[in-house]
Amino acid sequence: MTVRTRFAPSPTGYMHIGGMRTAFFAWLFARHMGGKFILRIDDTDEARNMAEALGPILQAFRWLGLDWDEGPEVGGDYGPYYQSQRGDLYRAAAEKLIASGHAYQDYSTPEEIKADREVAEKAKTPYLNVRRSLDLSDAQKAQYDAEGRSWSLRFLVPRGQTLALDDIIRGHVEWDTSLLPDPVIVRANGGPLYNFATVVDDAQLKISHVIRAEEHLSNTPIQVLLHQALGNEMPQFAHVPYVAAPGSKEKLSKRKLGEYRKNPQFKRLFERGDEVFLKINLPFTPERSPVAVEYYEKIGYLPAGVLNGLGRLGWSLDEKTEIMSLSDMVQNFTLERVVKAPAGFDPDKLFSFQSHWMKELPLEQKVAGCLPFLTAAKLISEPVSAETREYVSRVIVGLGDRLKLFADILDAAFFFQEDYPVDEKMFQKRVLKEGMPALLGEFRQRLESVEPFTLQSLEAALHVFAEEKGIPQGDMIHALRLSTTGCPVGPGVYDCLVLLGRDKSLARISKSLSQVSERPA
RNA sequence: GGCCCCAUCGUCUAACCCGGUUAGGACACAGGGUUUUCAUCCCUGCAAUAGGGGUUCAAAUCCCCUUGGGGUCACCA
């Protein structure tokens, strides 16, 4: 049997991180089994602008490097891959169900249905359809049609059966079909409903494994019954638990962003995004929040980091493996090892995966990843010259493991412009302290003649100077750092000086010292 | 409320299916070392089987109940 899995997003304008995790599992399973992964667009609500609504979803897949074998843009043998274009298939299936007596036209009015529900509620019995339309004669139907009374198509659920399902993740699950109301499968306006369309599509697309979020588990008995009525080959089902908000068991939701900002685990992530978006002049929107995949791309996460984080959310390889590349996961992924319980999304752990993969990234790719942030923040100009690129590369080397996200390059603005932020408090403490301005001035003079202007000779010069003056080297180092970068943390101070070059270093020290008279310590 | 699902450190998880471990790893947190900053790196520590009943020589593991959490009950997907 050829494995064929699918992900069927509705075009909503953004890709939910939890949905991405589900899609990722379906993708991993297909790749692990050497099968196909299909993208089908569930766009039965056709009102919106498709390009705008679908764009971010496809972009999320592209960014993460999750390719699809059939679907939008790539086509395939079972298309079209948009539900809105598959009307004929649904009509044919509906006719088949009517002909075989598995579906019936229901002329009940909304008022009648509402009343039925109230009766069931009062009697404390489960609501089931009254099925009064079942007894209608052809003549009566004709009369209703003549009156212009509308009908919807309902699937006739066979009552009194125990329906069992062996879900690959959840195990054996059973339902009593006597408790299932007859679902509407085709609306009065002719449009198919999800439970019906998805069954028709999964069969026609020859989906072998339906891997989807667990909120669909309770839809599954209806879908199994529909498959049976249609005479389809039954796919295997695997219901993946949902992704919960950090530290909770509640489904992660775009509608709860306000709440998440206060969540201690989520807070840092939101704040980092706010800083970055401000610098690169990108507005924050719910579609670009930590609930959406796009957020991670926009603040400089690596696909490898996000994928590793998603992969370990509700799945594990063994008792110790945490770091996994995409190919490691493809090689080892099985649905049997997917955890049944919902998993809380953990931004800290995601960040630690990110740190790891950023460390592994070759320099050239770090440069390529940082450049767009520097240009967006107008720290360098476009087009990027070869020298600028070379300089950025040297800065990144200097930053070393401090660069965790591509956007972290923006914290090193002092390498790129003279108008950089200064930590005033630390500046006061380390530069404007007793005696330091004089020492700094004196050391500045030595800097003029240090040859060559390299890490080793600078270090040696400072060492000698501190020795002569009988002061701790640390004092000088701190003062030098603050007076040349404005920042108390960052790459080694000698690295900073070398990167800045002699002229800029001297100029910045002078500028810092000129403030001494304005603001006496 | 009916139906269905789920339950191990603060978090992600391993061990559960097929009973026997000082209940393991990672993140986070705390302390220490390296780096005269920060980050990295190394070491140490903290910390869990929801509760109650069975079955058994032996239960995180099998069974039942309770509690808690969640999903779903649309002419949404």
Image: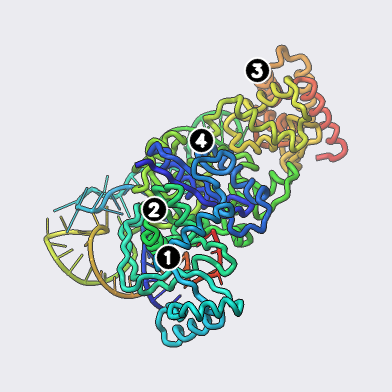
Whether labels 3 and 4 share one chain = yes
Q: Mark 2 against mark 1, which lies toward the viewer?
A: 1
Kind of residue indicated by mark 2: Ala
Mark 4 and 1 residues: CB-CB less than 8 Å, in contact?
Answer: no
Quarter of image, res A358: top right
Q: Chain of mark 1?
A: A
Image mark for residue A340: none
Q: Mark 2 against mark 3, which lies toward the viewer?
A: 2
Q: Residue furthest front?
A: A139
Q: Position of residue A4 (x, y in %)?
A: 42, 44
Secondary structure of the residue carrying tag 3 is helix
Secondary structure of the residue carrying tag 2 is strand
Q: Residue at point 40% right, 67% down?
A: A102
Which is more N-terminal, label 1 or label 4?
1
Mark 2 Cα shell of 10 Å, populated few (<14), some (14-19), many (≥20): many
- How is the protein colored in the picture? rainbow
Which is more N-terminal, label 1 or label 2?
1
Q: CA distance from mark 3 to mark 4?
A: 34 Å
Kind of residue indicated by mark 1: Ala
Whether labels 1 and 3 share one chain = yes
Mark 2 and 3 residues: CB-CB less than 8 Å, in contact?
Answer: no
Q: CA distance from mark 2 to mark 3?
A: 65 Å
Q: Nearer the viewer, residue B65 or A40?
A: A40
In the rendered image, which residue does mark 4 sit on?
A: A356
Whether labels 2 and 4 share one chain = yes
In the rendered image, which residue does mark 2 sit on?
A: A238
Q: CA distance from mark 2 to mark 4?
A: 31 Å
Image mark for residue A99: 1
